[in-house]
Structure formats: structure tokens, C-alpha cells
Amino acid sequence: MKHLTKKRLSRWLTLAAVATLTAAVGGTMQTVKAADPPDLWTQATDINDKRYPEPFDPDTGLPAFVPFDQAMTTAGVAGTSSVLLDNAAGNHVAVQLTHALTQSGSIWSTSTLPLTKNFSTKMHIYFGTNTDPGDGMAFVLRGGGTPSSVGNAGSGIGIWSVKPDTGGNIAGALTNTFAIAFDTYNNGAKNDTDVNVKTPSGAANADGQYIGWGFPAMDYQYGTKAYSALQFDSLNRADGGINKKTDGAGIPDQRGLGGYQVITKASGEKFTDGKWHTVTVDWQTNAAKDGGGKLTFSVEISSGHVFTKTLTWTAKDMTTIFGSTAISQGVNWGFTGSTGAKFEEGVVTFETIPGLVDASVSANVTGRNGSGPPAPVYVGDSLSQSYTITYNGINSKQDWPLPDKTTNTTTMTGTLRTTSGYGFEVNPDGKTVNVTVLKDGVTQTLVGTATQTADVIDKFGQTKKYATQVDVTLPGFTKEGGDGQTYTVTAPILAATASAAATASAGTIAGSNAKYSATVSTPEVLENPLGIGAPNFIFNNLSVGQIIKGLSGVSGTMDGTGNLVAAAPTGVHTTITASMTPVNFPGGTGYTAGNTTIGFTYSGRNVTLPDDNKAKTVYSADTPPTSGAITNLKLNMAPYPQIKLGNYSSTITWTIAATPIAG
């Protein structure tokens, strides 16, 4: 309610106007706890007989691993120390590459990744907390199939050569490979001489932990054949890193391929910190240019510190690195790890595995009737957010989600989100949201759990509750259904706060073995333009004699522009009313409320307003009012013989309201 100043002038009657609003926005936040996810993690324990910490996605709170039974294997590799870690359902959810002295382990994909197509993968690696660890793990891409035996233990990390053969050539290196090594032990001049003395600050790196990427079977990866010591490109120039042999005769001894990033002891960062470290690898082909592409990998060194590197390879480079069949047949991928005189945990989980589940999720916003959303919308307006979930069984290695081997049950969770200006409309219980699923022509209503709720008042003055997130259990898919399986999920959303048009995460659809995310775009949200402002009505030059005899059609004036300023949203029925309090003549002097009236014209309607506190309609229509002039302002008053000199006033209250349009 907006109060305008009441003016009191000696011997003259002044009437003041007051405007009110019937809608406002407010809300108190509260948290509704979502249901706890089932325990999908392994019960396996580390070298200290403690259960391995479970990796979680910090954004969704969902497990950051998937079962990889059909996609990754430790079989067929002689001498491996790898142990598959299963959960209670019997699914492989992690692999322990090493866990004792002098070991070498590995895990490899069961199928190849085509270098002619884009792919990406996301993993998490864990080294435990051993204060004297060794030696590390490596992510590997390999052409020509998976190896038949493990690579070198100790400083070899399953990929590098550690000593020359009898002919003076590098030996034991994993052929046809590109590797990203996560080295945890300082091997000094024999193997790590090019790394450990070259920290970014120039100081020695006592811990010797670093990320090194390169090509294990290429001789220019090593600085001296006497020890097969690793040597990286000291300038970290390597877009591809395999062109050293053509650098020219003037620098025949300049060796070093790939590059490195040292984790310095001074920063307190290290792999053996008892935490999971996220590794992502993304391949983007460039067939239109030369048949090559770009490989981008990132490594989470510590929370908030991620190292990222992009390498560019031509088709010729790819053949040089992976062998002559790599482009036509693709490459296998996996992890290796080793220990020597020192040891550590060497555990890997896989969060995203190319080809495990071939699916997609998209999201869009519509009106509640399924039409395109209006733009813009007002605070409190109702829309719908829909998800289209598609699964291709033929191209997938697993059902989505993977059934529990003991109960044959599945769990698929939708974590639904929207942009910051919107929220999901909550049921009257304040805790749930109705979610509609349309699958195979059948509509089903599911009940989701609301998280982070608040209130909003819509343009009709109704209070609604919304949530920033909804968690709901959804149906899964089976390979038997073939390709093109799809269903839609629709949830009601509300425009919660005034905001610009935006695009943001729509959440994730996650099963036990894969999760897919989507983004959604929402229209601009405007504040409800429900407001009104009115001028003061002023009647000057009124004498006691006039009032004693009564007044008829006395013209008045208005302050300001003399306009009634009104605004309302579209799509509603708008009503403006006004009521006037009795003029404040002294009590007991014979004045009767309602004996004074003010008449005026607004928007073609003639209004007579008595001073009896009863509301009179000023405007009523299905279209928004426009600001316009108040005209023909007149004052009428019945004879009032007992009038005395003084300052008298009344207050007019203006109210604007929006209601649904009838029909």
C-alpha cells in the first residue's frame, strides 16, 4: 500500500488519495531431504583394511562410477596384479591395479574407440595415503589390440622402458601407444632426471610426483639409451610431440617427446592424498581437414586445481603413434599401474565409458498446454519442463540401468533442475512434485521429492511453492528393445523471480551404469506489473456558507499530472476499485457518512464515490488498463449547517486486482 501525503489547508477542504497493491513476492527457504541412493559401492578394503572411499559427483550427489562388466576387462594379460572390485550386486565398479610391492597391473577396453568419431570418457583415480609411495598409474590409448602381458613394474608404470636391450635399444615399452602417466615416485637420474629438477619455480621437487604424457615406444622419448631415462620436451611445446626426428641435423641430440606438469611439494598437492582425482579424455576428430583430430585431457590435481592439455594429431601422426591399422580399426584404451620397492593403492573407477550405454537426454520448456512458452512471462506464471530420454539398445553394451544381479531390479534416477529464475511447482504437501511420464502411449504420474523450496505469489495473488530440484525414480531400458527407445518426462515449473532469458543445466538422468545431462532454455521473467498510483483531489475556495447550504458540482483540481497510473499483466482480468473514508468532520455535529460524494471520469467510465468506505468499480476488463487522465472532477455535499472553520480531509483507497479471465 502506498500512502500519499494528506494536505491540510486552512478553511479549505483537501481530499488525499491512497493506492494499494494486492500482489507481492516473498518466500522462506527450507530444505526437504531427498531419498538416500542405494549402496552401489564396493565393500573392498585398502591396505589399511579400511573400505575405499566412495567417489561422488559433487554437483548431483550421485555415485561417480558405473559398473563396467561388459566394457572393461583384466583378462588375457599375463602377469597382471589387477583385482576387480565388485559391489553387493556383483557388478564390477572399480579395479585395483596394485596393492603390494613389485607389481604391474592393467585393465583394458573390450572394444576399440574409432578415431574417426568423437568420444569422451571420465575416470577417477585413487592412490591412498602412503607417505612413501610408488610408482604410479597411466591412462593409455593403444593401437593393434590389447597387450598379452603386463608392462614393466617399478618406474615403468606398465608403459615405459626401464633399461635398454642387448642391442642398446629401448626395451619393454608398451608399443603403439600414447600415455598419460601419474607418477608418484622420484626415480632420479635413471628415469625421471628430466622432470624432478625442473619444477615451475626452478626448485627441486622432493616428492617427485608429476603428470607426464608421451609415447612410450618412441626412442626420442628417452634422453639416454644407457638408462632409457625419460626425457620430455622441456618447453612443453608438444601439440603432437612426435616430430623431433625432423627437427634438423643441427640438433640431433635434442630429445624429448610429450610434456609434463610437476606437482610441487610446496603447494601441498600430491596424488597420494587419500582423495579421488578426476581424469577426463576427449577426442574431437577433424575429418574435414586432414583426418586427424584433437585430444584434450584434464587431471584434477586438487580441489579447484585442474590441469588441461590439448594435443593435435594429423592422420599421419596417428598412424605413426598407433600403427597402420589404428585409423581403420580404432584403438583400445585402459589403465596400467605398477609398484617397485615402494607401493601404494592403485584404484580406478569409470564414470563415463564410451559405448557402454548409447543414450541421449534433451530438455525444453513449453506452456502448460504443450504450446511454445510465452516470452516474456510474469513471476508466478506456470509452464512445463519436458525431458526426452532416448536409448539405443543395439549400440549399447548394457541395459540402462544395469539390473542388480541378485534381485534383478533396476534404479534410474532423474535429478531435475532448471534455470535460476524458475522452480518446480510443489504439491500442497510442500514436499513432493508430480512428474508425468509418457512411455509407449501410456501416461503415468510419478511423485518426485522436492529439494530447496520457497514461495512465490502469482499475478492472481495466489501463493505457490516451488523447488529448485526434484529427484524422481524413472523406468529403465533393455537391450532387447533395440534402438530408438524413448519416453518423455514432464514436470510443472513456475517463474520464480524476475530474470533474463537463460540457459542452464536441466539436471541428469542416471542409472547404475551411465548418466546423461541436458541443458534447458527459459524465457525472460518480468515482475508482475500490478500497480496503481492516483493524484490528490483538491477543492479550493470553499466557504463555510457554501457548505452550510450544500455543494453541487464543485470543480476540483489534482496535483501532479492528474493521471491515474495503472499497470497489470496481460492474460488476466483487471479490476480497479476505489473507496473513500468519511470526511473527518467532528462527531456529534449532525454529519452523516455518505453525504459527500466525488464524481469523476476515467477510461470512459463515470464514477461516483461516496464517503462511506464502500468500494466502487473504476475499471473492469480482460485487457490491461492504461495510464490516463481523470476528468470531470466534481464535489457534491448535502447541506451541513453545523460546519465550523477547520481543516477537513478524507482518504481514498485505490485497489487494483488481477483474476483469471472467465471461460
Image (cartoon, rainbow, N blue to C red):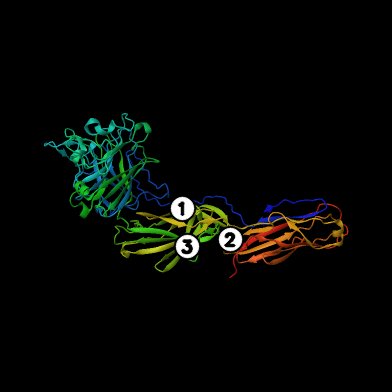
Q: CA separation, marks 2 and 1?
A: 39 Å
Q: Where the N terminus falls, by quadrant? A: bottom right
Which label number is shown at residue 617?
A: none
Q: Residues within 10 Å of mark 1 (few under 14, many from 20)?
A: few
- Residue occupying the far bottom of the picture: 663
In this figure, which residue is indicated by the disc labeled 1? 35
Does the rendering let one see residue 222? yes
The mark closer to the camera, 3 or 1, is: 3
Q: CA separation, marks 2 and 3?
A: 19 Å
Question: Going by the image, does 622 lie left or right of 299?
Answer: right
Q: Is mark 3 on a helix, strand or loop?
A: strand
Question: Going by the image, does 307 lie left or right of 81?
Answer: right
Residue situated in front as seen by the camera: 431 or 164: 164
Total tally of numbered discs in the picture: 3
The amino acid type, in three-letter code, at marker 3 is Thr
In this figure, which residue is indicated by the disc labeled 3? 366
Residue 348 horizontal/vertical position (percent): 31, 45
The amino acid type, in three-letter code, at marker 2 is Pro
Q: Say if mark 3 contacts mark 1, CB within 8 Å.
A: no
Residue 235 horizontal/vertical position (percent): 28, 36
Question: Going by the image, does 24 lie left or right of 283?
Answer: right
Residue 224 horizontal/vertical position (percent): 18, 33
Q: Residues within 10 Å of mark 3 (few under 14, many from 20)?
A: many
Q: Is mark 1 on a helix, strand or loop?
A: loop
Residue situated in front as seen by the camera: 623 or 392: 623
The mark closer to the camera, 2 or 1, is: 2
In this figure, which residue is indicated by the disc labeled 2? 569
Does the rendering let one see residue 409? no
Q: Where the C terminus falls, by quadrant? A: bottom right
Residue situated in front as seen by the camera: 172 or 217: 217
* Mark 2 or mark 3, earlier in chain: 3
